[in-house]
Image (tube, rainbow, N blue to C red):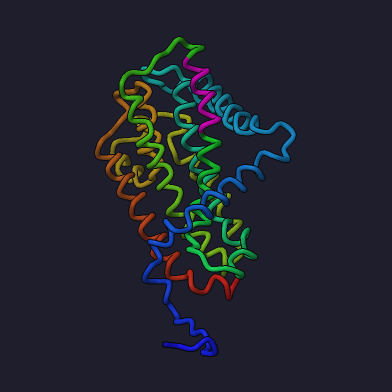
Amino acid sequence: MSSPKDPLIIEAGRAEAHYWRDLWRYRELFGFLAWRDILVRYKQTAIGVAWALIRPLLTMVIFTVIFGNVAKLPSGPLPYAILVGAAMLPWQFFSNALSESSQSLVSNANLISKVYFPRLILPASTVVVSLVDFAISFVILIGLMIWYSYAPGWQVLALPVFVILALLAALGPGLLITALNVKYRDFRFITPFIVQFGLFVSPVGFRSSVIPEQWRLLYSLNPMVGVIDGFRWCLGDSSGLDLPALAISLSTAMALLIFGVRYFRKMERGFADVI
């Protein structure tokens, strides 16, 4: 038995064996960080939660006018405004979650350098803020359905499944980029480009059916294709859900998540030294 005068020995990697258990032990820290980010997001803004409504609403109007009224693209059984709204909300959730999680480590540099906790908590907690934005923005979609006197069928019960899929699709790349951003700070300029590029290669303003058949499977490597088509299916676009394409999108999202977690864990030990 060691005496009180014996030095404290900290073994390298001692916490590694209990890392995933520590995620549960530090759940209160996760809740605190998520709540802090929510307060920061809305507390000092001029119009508060209205920002969560204005951004997707304006984008929805622009896409509806361009693709629905000018380009005259088919909307299927859904009114075009609902077609765009059903895509814009999950896309906004994905882009916000990706952007916030990719900056989470650099934004909390002081916390990382002072105390131990599973660093995975930081990017995961930022996703909660995006989830709150999504819940607020969902009011827009409800308003559109009331305006068009449109009621979805039983498929709407599957909507949480595709919200989770959107979360996983954002968290994987977010973990990868935030780990890279610690060492290579110029990655913060890459994230807006990824979000902007992804908006135009995702079926936000149009249906996936306009993509030529020979390119459909390659197009489905974008994980948000399955998410957006799934949202529209939940709201009544029964012909818009392509199961093989959904399987490919889901596989891509899971592959990115596994790779993101593995790379994040590989780089995690050096975060405090580099940041």
**Residue with the most extreme top position:** 149
Magenta-tinted stretch = 135-145
Residue drawn at (37%, 20%) of the image: 76
Of 180 and 275, the residue lying toward us: 275
Q: Nearer the viewer, residue 223 or 105?
A: 105
* In the foreground, 3 or 249: 3
**Residue at (29, 24) in percent of width and height:** 239
Residue at horizontal 57%, vertical 70%? 183
Name the quadrant of the N terminus: bottom left
Placement of 81 over or under 101, stated as above or below: above
In magenta stretch: residue 196: no
Q: Is residue 172 above or below residue 66?
A: below
The percent position of residue 163, horizontal first and vertical second, equals 41, 37
Residue 264 in picture, x, y percent from top left: 45, 64
Which residue is more in the foreground, 40 or 171?
40
Quarter-of-image position of residue 107:
bottom right
Tell me what residue is drawn at x 58 percent, y 45 percent: 35
Q: Quadrant of residue 265?
A: bottom left
- Residue 169 in the image: state x and y as whole percent: 41, 47
Quadrant including the C terminus: bottom right
Image coordinates for residue 247, horizontal then vertical, percent: 27, 43
User: In the drawing, does residue 110 fall left or right of residue 5?
Assistant: right
- Residue 141 falls inside the magenta stretch: yes
Q: Main secondary structure of the magenta part?
A: helix
